[in-house]
Image (cartoon, rainbow, N blue to C red):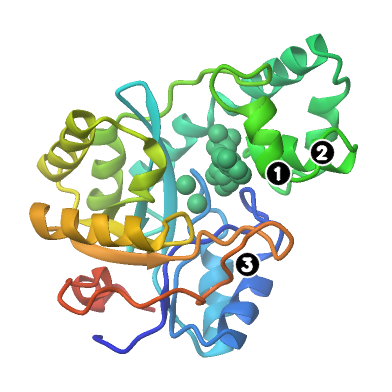
Amino acid sequence: MTFPLNADLHCHSTVSDGTLTPEALAERAKANGVDLWALTDHDEVGGQQRAMDAARTQGLRYLTGVEISVTFADVTVHIVGLGFDHTDPRLAEGLADTRDGRGPRAIEMGEQLAKVGIHGAYEGALKYVGNPRLISRTHFARFLVESGVCRDTPEVFRKYLTEGKPGYVPHRWAKLGDAVKWITGSGGLAVIAHPARYKFTPNEEYALFSEFKQHGGQGVEVVTGSHSAAEAVRYADMAREFGLAASRGSDFHSPDESHVDLGKLPPLPADLTPVWSLLAERVH
Ligand code: AMP
Ligand code: MN
Ligand code: MN
Ligand code: MN
Protein backbone atom coordinates (compact mmCIF):
# COMPACT_ATOMS: atom_id res chain seq x y z
CA MET A 1 0.00 0.00 0.00
CA THR A 2 1.66 3.16 -1.16
CA PHE A 3 0.65 6.40 -2.81
CA PRO A 4 -1.75 7.62 -3.96
CA LEU A 5 -4.08 6.55 -1.18
CA ASN A 6 -6.78 8.57 0.55
CA ALA A 7 -6.26 7.33 4.09
CA ASP A 8 -8.23 8.81 6.99
CA LEU A 9 -6.95 7.26 10.20
CA HIS A 10 -8.56 9.42 12.90
CA CYS A 11 -12.26 10.01 13.64
CA HIS A 12 -14.90 9.51 16.34
CA SER A 13 -18.30 7.81 16.53
CA THR A 14 -21.18 7.71 19.03
CA VAL A 15 -19.11 5.10 20.87
CA SER A 16 -17.06 8.08 22.18
CA ASP A 17 -17.74 11.76 21.45
CA GLY A 18 -18.73 11.72 17.76
CA THR A 19 -22.33 12.22 16.64
CA LEU A 20 -22.43 9.58 13.85
CA THR A 21 -22.59 5.81 14.28
CA PRO A 22 -19.72 3.65 12.99
CA GLU A 23 -22.00 2.61 10.09
CA ALA A 24 -22.81 6.23 9.14
CA LEU A 25 -19.11 7.12 9.29
CA ALA A 26 -18.20 4.23 6.99
CA GLU A 27 -20.81 5.38 4.51
CA ARG A 28 -19.60 8.98 4.68
CA ALA A 29 -15.94 7.91 4.32
CA LYS A 30 -16.83 5.92 1.21
CA ALA A 31 -18.84 8.81 -0.27
CA ASN A 32 -15.88 11.14 0.37
CA GLY A 33 -13.44 8.90 -1.49
CA VAL A 34 -11.58 7.38 1.46
CA ASP A 35 -9.64 4.19 0.53
CA LEU A 36 -8.32 3.23 3.95
CA TRP A 37 -10.20 4.09 7.13
CA ALA A 38 -9.77 3.77 10.90
CA LEU A 39 -12.29 4.63 13.62
CA THR A 40 -10.32 5.94 16.62
CA ASP A 41 -12.76 6.43 19.50
CA HIS A 42 -11.37 7.85 22.75
CA ASP A 43 -10.20 5.19 25.22
CA GLU A 44 -12.62 2.62 23.80
CA VAL A 45 -12.57 -0.18 21.23
CA GLY A 46 -16.27 -1.08 21.63
CA GLY A 47 -17.02 0.21 18.12
CA GLN A 48 -14.27 -1.69 16.30
CA GLN A 49 -16.21 -4.74 15.21
CA ARG A 50 -19.06 -2.58 13.91
CA ALA A 51 -16.64 -0.31 12.05
CA MET A 52 -14.85 -3.28 10.51
CA ASP A 53 -18.12 -4.84 9.38
CA ALA A 54 -19.40 -1.51 8.02
CA ALA A 55 -16.11 -0.97 6.17
CA ARG A 56 -16.49 -4.37 4.55
CA THR A 57 -20.07 -3.54 3.52
CA GLN A 58 -18.81 -0.31 1.92
CA GLY A 59 -15.80 -1.97 0.28
CA LEU A 60 -13.39 0.14 2.35
CA ARG A 61 -10.06 -1.09 3.62
CA TYR A 62 -9.90 -0.85 7.40
CA LEU A 63 -7.35 -0.60 10.21
CA THR A 64 -8.45 -0.95 13.85
CA GLY A 65 -8.05 2.28 15.80
CA VAL A 66 -8.18 3.94 19.20
CA GLU A 67 -7.14 7.31 20.68
CA ILE A 68 -5.75 6.93 24.20
CA SER A 69 -5.71 9.82 26.71
CA VAL A 70 -2.28 10.15 28.36
CA THR A 71 -0.87 12.58 30.91
CA PHE A 72 2.66 13.69 29.99
CA ALA A 73 4.42 16.58 31.77
CA ASP A 74 1.05 17.49 33.33
CA VAL A 75 -0.52 17.93 29.89
CA THR A 76 -3.13 15.68 28.25
CA VAL A 77 -1.58 14.07 25.18
CA HIS A 78 -3.42 11.76 22.79
CA ILE A 79 -1.81 8.62 21.41
CA VAL A 80 -3.51 6.95 18.46
CA GLY A 81 -3.16 3.19 18.08
CA LEU A 82 -3.62 1.55 14.66
CA GLY A 83 -3.74 -2.03 13.42
CA PHE A 84 -3.91 -3.80 16.81
CA ASP A 85 -5.96 -6.84 17.79
CA HIS A 86 -9.10 -5.22 19.20
CA THR A 87 -9.89 -8.34 21.27
CA ASP A 88 -6.60 -8.21 23.20
CA PRO A 89 -7.37 -8.51 26.96
CA ARG A 90 -4.47 -6.35 28.17
CA LEU A 91 -5.50 -3.53 25.86
CA ALA A 92 -9.09 -3.85 27.11
CA GLU A 93 -7.95 -3.72 30.72
CA GLY A 94 -5.73 -0.69 30.15
CA LEU A 95 -8.51 1.19 28.37
CA ALA A 96 -11.01 0.31 31.12
CA ASP A 97 -8.60 1.76 33.72
CA THR A 98 -8.12 4.87 31.60
CA ARG A 99 -11.88 5.40 31.30
CA ASP A 100 -12.45 4.84 35.00
CA GLY A 101 -12.21 8.42 36.25
CA ARG A 102 -14.57 9.86 33.64
CA GLY A 103 -17.79 9.37 35.62
CA PRO A 104 -16.67 11.11 38.85
CA ARG A 105 -14.91 13.80 36.82
CA ALA A 106 -18.12 14.55 34.93
CA ILE A 107 -20.12 14.85 38.18
CA GLU A 108 -17.50 17.28 39.49
CA MET A 109 -17.64 19.27 36.24
CA GLY A 110 -21.39 19.61 36.75
CA GLU A 111 -20.83 20.86 40.31
CA GLN A 112 -18.21 23.39 39.19
CA LEU A 113 -20.46 24.72 36.43
CA ALA A 114 -23.36 25.04 38.90
CA LYS A 115 -21.16 27.34 41.00
CA VAL A 116 -20.98 29.79 38.08
CA GLY A 117 -24.73 29.63 37.56
CA ILE A 118 -24.98 26.87 34.94
CA HIS A 119 -27.34 24.30 36.41
CA GLY A 120 -28.11 20.77 35.24
CA ALA A 121 -25.01 20.48 33.06
CA TYR A 122 -24.19 16.92 34.12
CA GLU A 123 -27.73 15.69 33.39
CA GLY A 124 -27.73 17.76 30.21
CA ALA A 125 -24.44 16.28 29.01
CA LEU A 126 -25.69 12.77 29.72
CA LYS A 127 -28.40 13.21 27.08
CA TYR A 128 -25.69 13.40 24.42
CA VAL A 129 -23.72 10.40 25.66
CA GLY A 130 -23.90 7.39 23.32
CA ASN A 131 -21.75 5.15 25.51
CA PRO A 132 -22.24 5.41 29.30
CA ARG A 133 -18.58 4.44 29.83
CA LEU A 134 -17.41 7.44 27.88
CA ILE A 135 -18.70 10.81 29.03
CA SER A 136 -16.46 13.53 27.65
CA ARG A 137 -16.09 17.31 27.74
CA THR A 138 -17.55 17.29 24.23
CA HIS A 139 -20.91 16.15 25.64
CA PHE A 140 -20.92 19.07 28.08
CA ALA A 141 -20.04 21.39 25.21
CA ARG A 142 -23.04 20.19 23.18
CA PHE A 143 -25.36 20.80 26.13
CA LEU A 144 -24.00 24.32 26.71
CA VAL A 145 -24.55 25.15 23.04
CA GLU A 146 -28.05 23.66 23.00
CA SER A 147 -29.06 25.56 26.13
CA GLY A 148 -27.82 28.83 24.62
CA VAL A 149 -24.97 29.46 27.09
CA CYS A 150 -22.48 29.57 24.19
CA ARG A 151 -22.70 29.91 20.42
CA ASP A 152 -20.52 26.94 19.45
CA THR A 153 -18.30 24.25 20.99
CA PRO A 154 -14.99 26.13 20.56
CA GLU A 155 -16.51 28.97 22.61
CA VAL A 156 -17.55 26.50 25.34
CA PHE A 157 -14.02 25.13 25.57
CA ARG A 158 -12.53 28.61 25.58
CA LYS A 159 -14.82 29.92 28.31
CA TYR A 160 -15.56 26.89 30.48
CA LEU A 161 -13.75 23.64 29.78
CA THR A 162 -10.03 24.32 29.44
CA GLU A 163 -7.42 24.67 32.17
CA GLY A 164 -8.13 27.53 34.55
CA LYS A 165 -11.76 27.86 33.44
CA PRO A 166 -14.71 27.21 35.78
CA GLY A 167 -15.80 23.80 34.42
CA TYR A 168 -12.30 22.37 34.05
CA VAL A 169 -11.52 19.46 36.36
CA PRO A 170 -7.89 18.31 36.22
CA HIS A 171 -7.52 14.63 35.56
CA ARG A 172 -4.69 12.10 35.45
CA TRP A 173 -4.89 9.79 32.43
CA ALA A 174 -2.73 6.81 31.38
CA LYS A 175 1.08 6.89 31.37
CA LEU A 176 2.75 7.35 27.98
CA GLY A 177 4.74 4.12 28.26
CA ASP A 178 1.65 2.11 29.23
CA ALA A 179 -0.46 3.43 26.34
CA VAL A 180 2.31 2.62 23.83
CA LYS A 181 2.75 -0.82 25.37
CA TRP A 182 -0.98 -1.65 25.19
CA ILE A 183 -0.95 -0.75 21.48
CA THR A 184 2.28 -2.46 20.45
CA GLY A 185 1.57 -5.44 22.75
CA SER A 186 -1.61 -6.10 20.77
CA GLY A 187 0.21 -5.95 17.44
CA GLY A 188 -0.46 -2.29 16.60
CA LEU A 189 1.48 0.86 15.83
CA ALA A 190 1.45 3.88 18.18
CA VAL A 191 1.16 7.42 16.79
CA ILE A 192 1.43 10.81 18.52
CA ALA A 193 -1.88 12.53 17.71
CA HIS A 194 -2.05 16.21 16.59
CA PRO A 195 1.23 17.29 18.26
CA ALA A 196 0.71 21.00 17.58
CA ARG A 197 -2.25 21.03 19.97
CA TYR A 198 -0.17 20.58 23.12
CA LYS A 199 1.67 23.90 23.18
CA PHE A 200 4.74 22.30 24.74
CA THR A 201 8.01 24.17 25.15
CA PRO A 202 10.71 22.88 22.74
CA ASN A 203 12.29 20.91 25.62
CA GLU A 204 9.02 19.26 26.64
CA GLU A 205 8.23 18.40 23.04
CA TYR A 206 11.67 16.89 22.56
CA ALA A 207 11.10 14.82 25.71
CA LEU A 208 7.70 13.63 24.42
CA PHE A 209 9.08 12.54 21.05
CA SER A 210 12.20 10.86 22.44
CA GLU A 211 10.40 9.05 25.28
CA PHE A 212 7.66 7.99 22.87
CA LYS A 213 10.32 6.44 20.61
CA GLN A 214 12.08 4.74 23.52
CA HIS A 215 8.78 3.13 24.50
CA GLY A 216 8.40 1.76 20.96
CA GLY A 217 6.21 4.42 19.36
CA GLN A 218 6.64 4.61 15.59
CA GLY A 219 4.38 7.31 14.14
CA VAL A 220 3.25 10.93 14.31
CA GLU A 221 0.24 12.67 12.81
CA VAL A 222 1.51 15.17 10.28
CA VAL A 223 -1.63 16.00 8.29
CA THR A 224 -4.64 16.32 10.62
CA GLY A 225 -7.77 18.44 10.95
CA SER A 226 -6.07 19.96 14.01
CA HIS A 227 -3.00 21.27 12.12
CA SER A 228 -2.54 24.34 9.96
CA ALA A 229 -0.48 23.96 6.77
CA ALA A 230 2.53 25.45 8.60
CA GLU A 231 2.12 22.99 11.47
CA ALA A 232 2.01 20.08 9.00
CA VAL A 233 5.34 21.29 7.57
CA ARG A 234 6.82 21.55 11.06
CA TYR A 235 5.74 18.04 12.11
CA ALA A 236 6.86 16.56 8.79
CA ASP A 237 10.30 17.84 9.85
CA MET A 238 9.88 16.27 13.28
CA ALA A 239 8.97 12.94 11.62
CA ARG A 240 12.22 13.13 9.59
CA GLU A 241 14.30 14.16 12.62
CA PHE A 242 12.96 11.38 14.84
CA GLY A 243 12.66 8.72 12.15
CA LEU A 244 8.90 8.37 12.65
CA ALA A 245 6.33 7.26 10.10
CA ALA A 246 3.63 9.81 9.24
CA SER A 247 -0.12 9.55 9.70
CA ARG A 248 -3.07 11.42 8.25
CA GLY A 249 -6.53 11.83 9.78
CA SER A 250 -9.36 14.35 9.89
CA ASP A 251 -10.29 13.90 13.59
CA PHE A 252 -13.87 14.17 12.33
CA HIS A 253 -16.49 14.27 15.14
CA SER A 254 -19.67 15.68 13.61
CA PRO A 255 -21.03 17.21 10.39
CA ASP A 256 -22.11 20.24 12.48
CA GLU A 257 -18.90 20.74 14.44
CA SER A 258 -15.91 19.51 12.45
CA HIS A 259 -14.35 21.85 9.91
CA VAL A 260 -12.47 19.02 8.17
CA ASP A 261 -14.62 16.24 6.73
CA LEU A 262 -13.60 12.59 6.42
CA GLY A 263 -10.98 12.14 3.71
CA LYS A 264 -10.82 15.85 2.87
CA LEU A 265 -7.19 16.46 3.75
CA PRO A 266 -4.03 17.34 1.83
CA PRO A 267 -1.70 14.41 1.06
CA LEU A 268 1.31 13.56 3.20
CA PRO A 269 4.67 14.88 1.96
CA ALA A 270 5.86 12.24 -0.51
CA ASP A 271 9.26 11.58 1.12
CA LEU A 272 7.73 10.49 4.45
CA THR A 273 6.96 6.86 5.26
CA PRO A 274 3.17 6.59 5.66
CA VAL A 275 2.12 4.56 8.72
CA TRP A 276 0.03 2.30 6.51
CA SER A 277 3.13 1.09 4.66
CA LEU A 278 4.18 -0.48 8.00
CA LEU A 279 0.73 -1.97 8.58
CA ALA A 280 0.03 -3.80 5.33
CA GLU A 281 -0.56 -7.11 7.13
CA ARG A 282 -2.99 -5.50 9.58
CA VAL A 283 -5.43 -4.17 7.00
CA HIS A 284 -8.92 -5.74 6.97
P1 AMP B 1 -12.09 14.75 27.28
O1 AMP B 1 -11.46 13.51 26.73
O2 AMP B 1 -13.35 14.50 28.04
O3 AMP B 1 -11.11 15.60 28.07
O4 AMP B 1 -12.56 15.63 26.04
C1 AMP B 1 -11.64 15.96 25.02
C2 AMP B 1 -12.39 16.20 23.73
O5 AMP B 1 -12.92 17.50 23.71
C3 AMP B 1 -11.47 16.16 22.52
O6 AMP B 1 -11.36 14.86 22.04
C4 AMP B 1 -12.19 17.02 21.51
O7 AMP B 1 -13.20 16.28 20.88
C5 AMP B 1 -12.85 18.04 22.39
N1 AMP B 1 -12.08 19.30 22.49
C6 AMP B 1 -10.98 19.54 23.22
N2 AMP B 1 -10.58 20.83 23.09
C7 AMP B 1 -11.47 21.42 22.26
C8 AMP B 1 -11.63 22.74 21.74
N3 AMP B 1 -10.78 23.71 22.08
N4 AMP B 1 -12.67 22.98 20.92
C9 AMP B 1 -13.54 21.99 20.59
N5 AMP B 1 -13.44 20.72 21.05
C10 AMP B 1 -12.43 20.44 21.87
MN1 MN C 1 -13.02 14.08 20.86
MN1 MN D 1 -7.34 14.10 20.23
MN1 MN E 1 -9.57 12.64 18.13
* Dot 2 or dot 1, earlier in sequence: 2
Is residue 135 visible in the rendered image? The answer is no
- The residue carrying mark 1 has its beta carbon less than 8 Å from ligand 1: yes
The N terminus - image quarter:
bottom left
Residue type indicated by callout 1: Thr
Residue type indicated by callout 2: Phe
Residue density around tag 1, few if under 14, some if 14–19, many if 20 or more, within 10 Å: many
Relative to 166, 26 lies left or right: left
SS at mark 2? helix
Image coordinates of residue 125 in percent, x first then y, are 78, 35
Query: Mark 2 near mark 3, Cβ–Cβ under 8 Å?
Result: no
Instruction: Name the residue that disc number 1 marks.
Output: 153
Between marks 1 and 3 in the image, the one whose residue lies nearer the viewer: 1
Between marks 2 and 3 in the image, the one whose residue lies nearer the viewer: 2
Q: Please state which of residues 17 and 52 is positioned toward the viewer in this rendering.
A: 17
Instruction: Report the disc number at residue 22.
Output: 3
Residue density around tag 3, few if under 14, some if 14–19, many if 20 or more, within 10 Å: many
Image coordinates of residue 44 in percent, x first then y, are 51, 47
- Residue at 38 percent across and 27 percent down: it is 75
Instruction: Report the disc number at residue 143.
Output: 2
Residue type indicated by callout 3: Pro
